[in-house]
Amino acid sequence: MEKPYVIGIDMGGTNTVFGIVDTRGNVISKSAVKTATHMDVNLYIDDIYVELIKLINTVGGIDKIKGIGVGAPNGNYYTGNIEFAPNLNWKGVIPFATLMADKFGIPTALTNDANAAAVGEMIYGAARGMKNFIMITLGTGVGSGIVIDGKIVYGHDGFAGELGHVISVRNNGRMCGCGRTGCLEAYASATGVARSAREILETSKKDSLLRNIPIEDITSKDVFDAAMEGDEVAKEIFIFTGKILGEAFADFVAFSAPEAIILFGGLSKAGDLILKPIVENMEKNLLNIWKGKVKVLFSELKEADAAVLGASALAWEL
């Protein structure tokens, strides 16, 4: 095969992971750069180029690469643009696929990061054999990829499936990075968990290991670590987060009747701490016709591989 490799890029609000993928779906090599530290998208692409070209050279150079696939927040599959992404430093409409193609001289396709993860999970992971499922990515934000009858749902404009920004979670709730209030993302993302911790610590006098950390420095990992040590406040935060997710999932089931909802991303590492309250509250709020029928699963792929593999799948079509 003249061009036996493609590149998959998973752009998160904090980090960007990318890898070279062969025709069998093996991630041959992988590297990463920080997303959040780049205020200029062109400098960000320059840094990706520096790291990626090292990987490309190990497989025989640019001539061996068929294409680049990118999963990005607010990525539009139809246009190749990143449009008004709340968790990125670059505002407005960014013609990212064009910028990448110009920099590398390789055809580039782009989609929403959660859609890319869903494709990766469908081909290589927990959703193998499923034609109807929802992928939920719990990272810096909350993303989603909806698969119905074996196809990603893009909608008429390329932006279908922004379930992290449903606003029925809490009326007049927290301000979200998108500029609205009460979004699921403001509560159920890694940053949302940290916000919950700060709120509880500021409004109560409960003892907690988290009080040993400067309140503005608390992360979702700190909450997880404290919960694993039996900290009641930390466990309360996960129960609260799982309740909100479970209630939202019951709504999601109502419109697409998925076989499963698959959790991916850093927050899913909390395991049963997050899974048990999600399932309990989802089941409690489901219509009877769906009770006991919808699985909630963790991704079966290595962290970031689902999105890298899913993004890379776009490139084989170029």
Image (cartoon, rainbow, N blue to C red):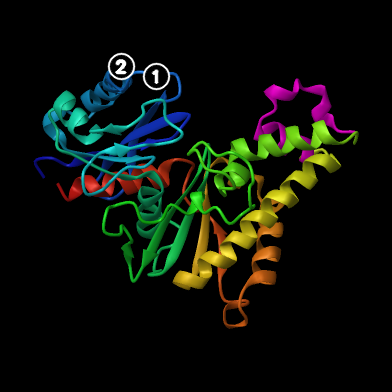
Whole-percent x, y for residue 109 in the image: 22, 42
| Residue nearest the viewer, comparing 183 with 245 | 183
Tell me which corner region of the image, top left, top right, bottom left or bottom right, holds residue 286: bottom right
Residue 209 shown in magenta: yes
* Amino acid type of the residue tagged 1 in the rendering: His
> Rounded to the nearest whole Å, what is the CA distance between mark 2 and mark 1?
7 Å
- Does the magenta stretch mainly form a helix, a strand or a loop? helix
| Residue nearest the viewer, comparing 190 with 314 | 190
Q: Check disc 1: other Cα within 10 Å, few if <14, some if 14-19, many if 20+.
A: some
Query: Which numbered disc covers residue 43?
Result: 2
| Residue nearest the viewer, comparing 248 with 280 | 248
**Pointers 2 and 1 in contact (CB under 8 A)?**
yes
Label 2 residue SS: helix
* Mark 1 lies on residue: 38
Bounds of the magenta span?
A: 207-227
Whole-percent x, y for residue 61 in the image: 16, 26
Tag 1 or tag 2, which sits nearer the N-term? 1
* Amino acid type of the residue tagged 2 in the rendering: Leu
Tell me which corner region of the image, top left, top right, bottom left or bottom right, holds residue 100: top left
Asked if residue 268 can be seen in this view, the reply is: yes
Q: Is residue 197 left or right of residue 24?
A: right
Q: Check disc 2: other Cα within 10 Å, few if <14, some if 14-19, many if 20+.
A: few
- Which quadrant: the N terminus? top left
Residue at screen point 11% across, 31% down:
63
Residue at screen point 27% across, 20% down:
42
Whole-percent x, y for residue 277 in the image: 71, 58
Tell me which corner region of the image, top left, top right, bottom left or bottom right, holds residue 97: top left
